[in-house]
Image (cartoon, helix red, strand yellow):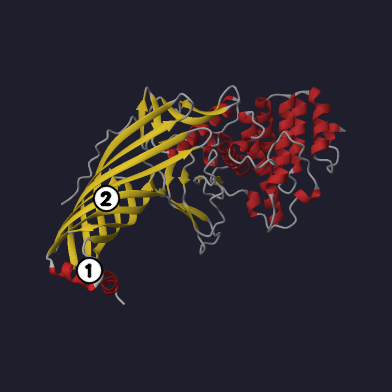
Amino acid sequence: MLLPLALFACSPDPSPALLLAVDRDEDGEYRVAPRPIPELTDAQHMEGALGHGYRGGRIAIDLFSADMGIRYDEGGRMDLDYDVVDDVAIPMDEDGLVLWTYYHTLSQVRADLNGLGVDTEPVWPIDFAYQPAFVGMDFTSGENAAYLGSGVHLFILLPDALPAVLPLAANPGVIRHEFGHALFNVLTAGDAFALAPYDESEDPNVANQVRALNEGFADMIATLTLDDNDFFDLSLPSVTTRDVAADAAADASMYPENAESYDPYALGTVYASFAWDLRALTSPDEAVVLVVAAVDAWSAEAAWGDTDRWAELLLELAVAEDEALQTPLCAAFTARFPERPTPETCA
Amino acid sequence: MTPTLLLSLLCGGGGVAHAVEGAEHSTAGVQLSAFALQTPARHAIVPSLGVWASYTPRPWALTGELTLTRRAKSNDYYGINTQLVRASALAELAMGTRPMTVHIGAGPALTVSSARAEWSETDAERITRADLGVRARVALDGPLGERLAWQWQVGVASRGVYNWDYDLGAGLGVQW
């Protein structure tokens, strides 16, 4: 019987002190560097306190269930090839670098936000699937990272669509953006696995409008925690519409009227740009804390159909913290939301 | 028209007749394949180049293979270039007549992988490892005239327990 399945190579240290990952350095440049990932207890199989990784698997819709719920059928266990040289884990394949970057980014955003008093613990653990198959869902290979809420609570990473640039799944801004969606779900639905109330609205425009704030909030988490106004530039240099330091302003065409073809990113970028205005007047840390508090307050009001109300709440909270912000922040509000009546805080 | 008949017509009666008469034959050649290389998280399709040699005393055969493939990726931030060499020896069942023999076999495989990772102008490391595994294949081979031979095969091979690569290829060689 031919069963010589022995492994010649010794298994590498499952918990190396440092692992190679793409990160933003203090000088503002992105580069690959050795980084600690304390939560990753098994680097070979991508398992740890922040969640477990699976290769493949299947995202399916229960067509015959009452709520047509989405589920993930787990794929195989990850098995990364790497070696540890001078205490640094070096991957033998690009996938290893992508996956360690993903995990390191989550570890870092968790430490950053928890350190600021933003409780991210309800988000963890969150498993992830690398290149799952999709059945009846509208994903493409160009969509390289995604958060699947709707009761599934799963990150999805897809292989690179553009081989010459940094894969989206290895872009620290993109991973922070997707984490932002998970945090938004926890803040608004109350539980990582809960269905959000706006998703159950009978008016599809309500769900779409919340999608805009959701995308904006995800960009806020990415831009403010990285202090980078245009993290997309690393992976999609041709996309210039997501720069939150530009002059995006809301107009009537950005609000959903037709549920079939709504682009939530345009209005989302306006929200994220307003948060960037606040960052310019305060600091990235102060801004991100206020942004999260404003989503909390907006969620408490359940003003699902009025996402601009979130911007008013951010204004209120910021001015309550520091009255000196009133004049410049009200000016920023007027510039970003020219068709919105003047908020009480600015009256 | 069956593939056997088609090949008989293409290859000429003399060569085929000569090959059918022999109870055993040997072939060796070069093969190109599409290689589905299992990475930590998926299968990447890459080309591969290989050589093979078979000794076929029907209904048995012994085949040796050596396969080389490469996967490279680089961008502004890093480059990872991986080469993989696999040697395998297969004990096979050989069926059919000489114009087209079917091989079904399995055996041990040794894969040596070598990866060079570069992540800055000054930082780079090469890592090499060897994995023992199993190899199985289904192949067809036959003569092209008196001295030449063709081969087509589909196969699978493991590196360790969890990594399984697939290949589909065709080759051209000599027979004697």
Image-based side of A298 in relation to A160, left or right: right
Local SS, label 2: strand
Q: Distance between the residues labelled 1 and 2?
A: 21 Å
Instruction: Return the x and y of residue A213 as percentages of the image width and height.
Output: 69, 43
A148 to A230, vertically: above or below: below
Disc 1 element:
loop
Residue for point 68% across, 38% down: A295
Quarter of the image for residue A269 reads top right
Could you tell me which chain the residue with mark 1 belongs to? Answer: B
Tell whether A12 sits left or right of A272: left
From the image, tell me which residue sits under label 2. B51
- Name the residue carrying label 1: B99
Quadrant in the picture for residue A95: top left
Question: Does residue B15 appear anywhere in the picture?
Answer: yes
Task: Please name whichever residue, B104 or A230, is drawn nearer the observer in this view of the structure.
Answer: B104
Q: Are marks 1 and 2 on the same chain?
A: yes
Viewer-proximal residue among A44 and A170? A170
Q: Is residue A112 found left or right of B137 in the rendered image?
A: right
Q: Where does residue A234 sit, x and y in percent of width and height?
A: 59, 36
Which tag, 1 or 2, sits closer to the chain's start?
2
* Res. A207 mark: none
